[in-house]
Amino acid sequence: MKQGFHTRTHRWSHQPSAHDARWIPLPDSLQARVITDPDPLTHAECDLGHQHHQAPGLLLRPQSAHEVATAVRFAAQHGVPGVIAKGAGHATGGQALASQHGALYLDMRSLNQIQVEHTHITLGAGATLRAAAETAWTYGLRLTSGVTGYANLSVGGVLSAGGWSLDHVTGTIGDYADELQIVDGTGTIHTCSPSRDPELHRWVLGGLGQFGIITRAKLRLQPARPYASFRVLRGMDHTEMLRAARSLIRRGQLDSVYGRRRGHNPSWEILATAYHHRNDDPMPDMLRGAPDPDAHAGDPQPYIDQILSHDTDLYDPLIEQGWAEIPKRWWDYFLSDTTISGFLAAAHASEPDGMFGESAVALAMPKFRRSVGTGLRLPPPSARGEGELVWLADGLLDPGLHYSGDPHQWGRAAESWIEHLTEEAAHRGATIYHIGNVQHSMLEHYQRTLDHVTALRSEYDPVGLFGRGLWRTTEKPATAQQPAPHHD
Ligand SMILES: Cc1cc2nc3c(=O)[nH]c(=O)nc-3n(C[C@H](O)[C@H](O)[C@H](O)COP(=O)(O)OP(=O)(O)OC[C@H]3O[C@@H](n4cnc5c(N)ncnc54)[C@H](O)[C@@H]3O)c2cc1C
């Protein structure tokens, strides 16, 4: 029986037995793409945060950009209340959930084709970054950007966020997306790049899915250095961690340096990685004088094993034990090099008990400001200018796998801490990375560019199909002007 949409009740249903002119059948080409199995429906109705739920009005698994375009056109013509592109569903604040009943959800994981051509890899938006990195590696190549801390994320979801990779020496993943295929809110398919339709290209990256649906991305590759050496330098407070990380970065030898704290342990560690050509270990030289110089993480590994080791060592075992099912709350701010220390001090000082279960992490991930060019909004530069570091400071909180308390109460405590942290961050001129649970308005996010963004949205999504996610708050901001940054 056919599926269709009722234009008065805004409900999706099978064809009614009596003729009803307001029930419109979904185009025939999409009928076979309707998903009714419980597993994908459960995946679609919530995300990793388990804070919000919104069941899809209808869930489709498109097989091509043309099918995405047909679905979007249908939605635009018949008043469907929103279209949501869903990747791996690993945001935590309802980013890939509709704000109202009846929305059409597209499970993008079915668009997972991968093709390597010389300097680029072309990926369906639902392919994972992990699959992209593994495929490139079979050609002796790597994603120029490097990968995220956890790589089982969809390419479309990561590019919509921006994609802050672990390699501090590169830009974001979006910075190396040399071509994108986008379906806009009228169902038109665009191919855009920095030279072709550059405005669309620029704003889709880091644009949180509000200008169109990414169906395909062409990411830049480079030859992979085959080996990676890695150390964890332990036992620092945040000030020592930042000082040591800056000093290691200044030497210019390491490819990835960032700070992390894990679980109940409040001390910070530095994860330092170098990629190299020969099967030897350059670390002792590169880490001379650094804290915890004896840290040892084994022999050099193949590059691919090392970059995916967060998945295999940390997250895969946790997911096996049910980590994906427990509640999470996430704070994510971009801070300048002059303000991160004060922010982390404020976070430590205000941390309520029980925010960091044994599987929770906080990260401080730097990049050079000059390398980041996507639609991400970064805090204003200080006197150090384009050469300075910008940090993504985030905390992926959870109550732990064996938590026996009330998860709602835990969630509320975490949200209230995040509200406080957001004030602390705003006071320091921070901007927000929208992958977690930080609430703020579009005006606060886009500031002076909001009028431009609004005009672009009306051009590419005239009906407003894509602006309907739960996290896209449009109410007036608490403060109309961002305060002048407070430097610590
Ligand atoms: C353990 C863990 C570690 C992480 N580490 C990092 C990290 O190191 N760096 C980093 O930058 N991020 C990191 N992330 C965050 C992650 O990049 C984002 O949450 C990303 O959006 C997740 O991709 P997804 O496929 O799960 O997207 P979803 O959660 O499915 O969707 C997220 C948003 O993207 C939109 N979207 C999804 N697919 C498309 C598409 N094809 N076209 C248009 N819009 C689309 C959705 O509508 C939604 O608004 C991490 C996440 C987890 C869970």
Image (cartoon, rainbow, N blue to C red):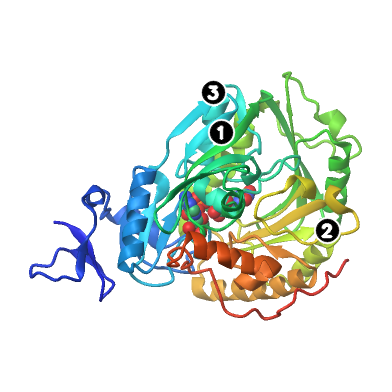
Q: Of the residues under marks 1 and 2, which one precedes in the sequence?
A: 1
Q: Nearer the viewer, residue 354 or 366?
A: 366
With respect to residue 147, does 225 lie above or below? above
Distance Cα–Cα, label 1 vs label 2:
32 Å
Within 10 Å of disc 1 (Cα), the crowding (few <14, some 14-19, many 20+) is: many
**Which amino acid, by three-letter code, is at mark 3?**
Thr
Q: On the picture, is 63 further left or further right than 193? A: left
Q: Which residue is mark 2?
A: 381
Nearer to us: label 3 or label 2: 2
Q: Which numbered circle lies on residue 138?
A: 3
Q: For the residue labelled by badge 2, is the local secondary structure a helix, a strand or a loop?
A: loop
Which quadrant, please, contains the N terminus? bottom left
Q: Secondary structure at mark 1?
A: helix
Residue closest to the eye, 323 or 4: 4
Could you give the CA–CA distance between mark 3 and mark 2, rounded to whole angstroms?
40 Å
Disc 2: CA contacts within 10 A as few (<14), some (14-19) or many (>=20): some
Picture quarter containing residue 481?
A: bottom right
The image quarter in which residue 10 lies? bottom left
Name the residue at 43% across, 54% down.
86
**Which percent across, then down, holds residue 74?**
31, 59
Q: Amino acid at mark 1?
A: Ala
- Cβ atoms under marks 1 and 3 closer than 8 Å: no
The local crowd at label 3, few if under 14, some if 14 to 19, many if 20 or more residues have their Cα within 10 Å, is: few
Residue 380 relative to residue 313: left or right: right
Query: Which label sits on residue 133?
Result: 1
Q: Is residue 292 left or right of residue 162?
A: right
Q: Position of residue 441 (x, y in %)?
A: 61, 73
**x then y, percent, for residue 207:** 58, 57
